[in-house]
Image (tube, grey):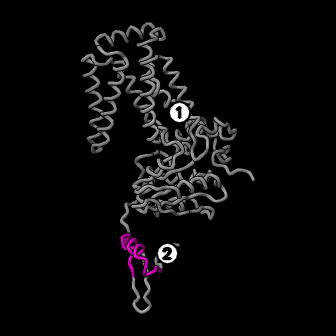
Amino acid sequence: MHQVSDSIEDTDIQEITKKVITGQTILFFHKTFQLLSIDTYSAPTRSITNTEVESTVIGPQDAFTESLETNISLVKRRIKSPMLKNETFTIGTETDTKISVVYMDGIVNKDNLEVLKERIEKLDHPAYTDVTILKQLIEDNPLSPFPQYYLTVRPDTVSGYLHDGRIVVFMENSSAVMICPVTFLEMFMSVEDYYNRWTTASLLRMLRFFGFFLTITITPLYVSALTFHPEILPYELLLNLQESRAKVPFPPLFEVLFIELIIEVLREAGSRMPAKVGQTIGIVGGIVIGTAAVEAGLISNILVVLVATSALLSFLPPIFLVSNTSRFVRYIFIISAGLFGLFGQMIAFTWLMVHLLRIDSLGKPYMSPVIPRKATDLLNGIIRFPTKYLTKKSGISKSPKK
């Protein structure tokens, strides 16, 4: 039950000032010399609308807002259970931002919960404007380009993870919520997978998962083949590439970096413009610049096709942070391919696998269930088995046996 009033000490000037600043009303009783603070502040909030970030064809369409109370109520509307617990913390030495840690008591891993609470209590950051700032401060590996916690704006996604024993962190003034711990494979899973047939869901998951590795290897393979290993290409394709690059004065490495930079500029410019103008700039700019660059002999037409395919594949993951990660990792592979060819790509791939195996999410292995293997988790991995077989909790969130 929400407390609307509270008595305070008349000598605590800092507490009185803080309550007045936050919009509360202070009543002074001159006969008893007592103070009473009443919560009369009602912050303006926007209505619940359809999600634009994680849109789906099947399933609920509502999304979180910037109101902490509204977001929690959207989850409680789906989970009507006394096991649903909510613990509130105040963080930010200058902003006094409220966050809520929500979990299912009896299902959640208590060790994970204690680790999260300990990290939150040790925070000493002045201001929080979004939950993404909190996520970066409590990550296990802050230097890693990979996101170690799941961000979503969908209440149905949060409800599913709560039933699985995960912990969800809400923050006021933030429409996104944080889910932890998570695995690398879950970064390619969407809540719509559970609304589709298992065959369709499995196909889409494989497309997202293998698309991630394709987007970081397509253009580096182009650089390796033309610089060091032309023998790996079919003879007809090699003739087409040589004809296409007849006018290009740059080596393949600089050619790829040039067109990748152009794509980044178009993407960034389109995201900063109004929606309709941004779409026009992205489409028209890409066509005009790509065609003009090919005709001017700056890049080959085959490279334009490869870069465009790589850019499309980078947007397959449901979490935009994974798309940003693939863009960063792709540059490492391109430079490695330009310096050492396929051998450099293998070195980069080895670094990627070792790095993923070393990452933790709230102290749990990021590559679970692959390393270490959990047999039941494989039923809900790259291939999603029929729903009736998905009855076990994930190993990363399961409570340890006493």
Nearer-the-camera pick, 313 or 339: 339
Between 396 and 236, the one lying in front of the other is: 396
Q: x, y percentage for residue 237?
A: 42, 11
| Real-space CA distance between mark 1 and mark 2, rounded to the nearest whole angstrom | 47 Å
Residue at the image position 37 percent from the left and 27 percent from the top: 308
Q: Which residue corresponds to the image point at 42% horizontal and 88% vertical from the top-left?
A: 33
Which residue has dot 1 on it?
209
Q: Position of residue 59 (x, y in %)?
A: 50, 49
Magenta stretch bounds = 7-26
How would you rate the neighbour count of disc 2 (Cα within 10 Å): few for under 14, some for 14-19, many for 20 or more?
few
Q: Is residue 11 magenta?
A: yes
**Nearer-N-terminus badge (1/2):** 2
Q: Crowding at label 1, few (<14), some or many (≥20) Cα neighbours within 10 Å?
A: many
At horizontal 59% and vertical 34% (from top left) the residue drawn is 357
The outermost residue toward the right is: 402
Tell me the quarter of the picture where residue 15 sits: bottom left
Give amino acid for label 2.
Gln
- What is the number of the mark on residue 3? 2
Q: Is residue 222 visible?
A: no
CB within 8 Å, label 1 to label 2: no
In this picture, is 132 found above or below 375?
Answer: below
Q: Nearer the viewer, residue 149 or 52?
A: 149
For residue 57, which numbered disc appears in the image?
none
Is residue 258 found left or right of 33 in the rendered image? Answer: left
- Amino acid type, mark 1: Phe
In percent of width and height, residue 140 lies at: 54, 44
**Which callout, 1 or 2, points to the residue nearer the camera?**
2
Secondary-structure class at tag 1:
helix
Verify whether residue 367 appears in magenta.
no
In the image shown, does 240 or 67 lie closer to the viewer?
A: 67
